[in-house]
Amino acid sequence: MAVPVILPKMEMSQENATITEWLTVEGETVRKGQPLLMVETDKVSVEIESPADGILAGIRFGAQETVPVTTVIAQILAPGEELGAVEDPDGQAVSLKTQEFALPADDRVVTPVARRMATELGVDLNAVSGSGPGGRVVKADVEAAASATGPRGLRASPAARRLARAGGIDLAAVPGSGPRGRVQAADVQALLAQSTAESPADELIPFAGMRATIARRMTESYQRAPHIHLRATADVSAVEATRRRLSELGDEKITFTVMLVKVCAWALCHHPRVNATVTDAGMQLCADVNVGVAVSLPEGLIVPVIRQADQRSLSDLARALND
């Protein structure tokens, strides 16, 4: 008998959750307790495990779809078994398309670590030979397959992939400095720092699940709650020596403010999600790095903006501040 995979209710007031990623594919043999997919609510991100041994079938919702709790999102079938009708939380019966999946001859299993690595590296598990007990696919098998597949098995750390997505970087164009050419976060950051003066359009990253809630509540907190500022003491003797030397060598006087603007611009290049604004639609990543500098005048406080500060030299920044 088909076993339903149900989206659980994880919080008292929870009404739905968003599927962020399927860790398995339809027709794949799974084991009871094996992670099938990742879901996200306003507060948590969790794995949903298989309720039984069998073949995953009848997947009804894809990644980034929001689903009401207690909904049947898939079924676990025995070999040769057909899909049956399911009932949604509102009591409405839904007929699923009848399919049959043959049980693979080797009936292998894949470790969770190997499965996640295969997803990360774009490796087809059906083409991987398992070296573990009973043909079990382990981490080393996926690593070997990724090395053999070339560009299709692009190796990159999760942090590097996040930075590349945020900065609009094609990972295939990033030289990897890690083991076996693995692209590290530092590799992506280096490429971002070498970006040209041409500014791409701003990128909108839609919020999902708890990210939208966090952004909304942090914005409300900033607007309504009092703030506490943290101050720290640091030895800037080396910075002062550098500042004096640069001022003596150039035509412009390099002040601490000039150096702070340069450092802020550098930091925003390396952390693009800090250089963003929050909208109702999501996080708006700014294509340009512009730095505002508060200036006190007898008439009041003004904040002139130095545009594309990341592309300016210290002398250029000094001239802009003096102007």
Image (tube, rainbow, N blue to C red):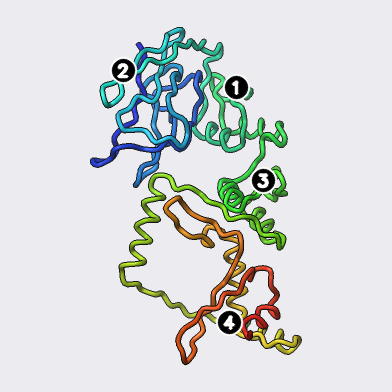
Relative height, residue 183 to residue 195 (above, below): above
Relative height, residue 145 to residue 56 (above, below): below
Residue 147: x and y in percent read 69, 35
Quarter where residue 105 is shown: top right
Mark 1: few/some/many CA within 10 Å (<14, 14-19, 20+):
few
Give the Cα separation between the discs numbered 1 and 3. Answer: 24 Å
Element type at marker 4? Answer: helix
Give the Cα separation between the discs numbered 1 and 4. Answer: 58 Å
Q: Which mark is first along the chain, 2 or 3?
A: 2
Q: Quadrant of the N terminus?
A: top left
Q: Which mark is first along the chain, 1 or 2?
A: 2
Name the residue: 39% across, 42% down: 45
Q: Which mark is first along the chain, 2 or 4?
A: 2
Type of amino acid at the residue the image marks with label 2: Ala
Type of amino acid at the residue the image marks with label 4: Thr
Type of amino acid at the residue the image marks with label 3: Leu
Name the residue: 57% across, 38% down: 120
Q: Is residue 236 left or right of residue 195?
A: left
Give the Cα separation between the discs numbered 4 and 2. Answer: 67 Å
Give the Cα separation between the discs numbered 2 and 1. Answer: 34 Å
Which dot marks residue 257? 4
User: Which residue corresponds to mark 2?
Assistant: 93
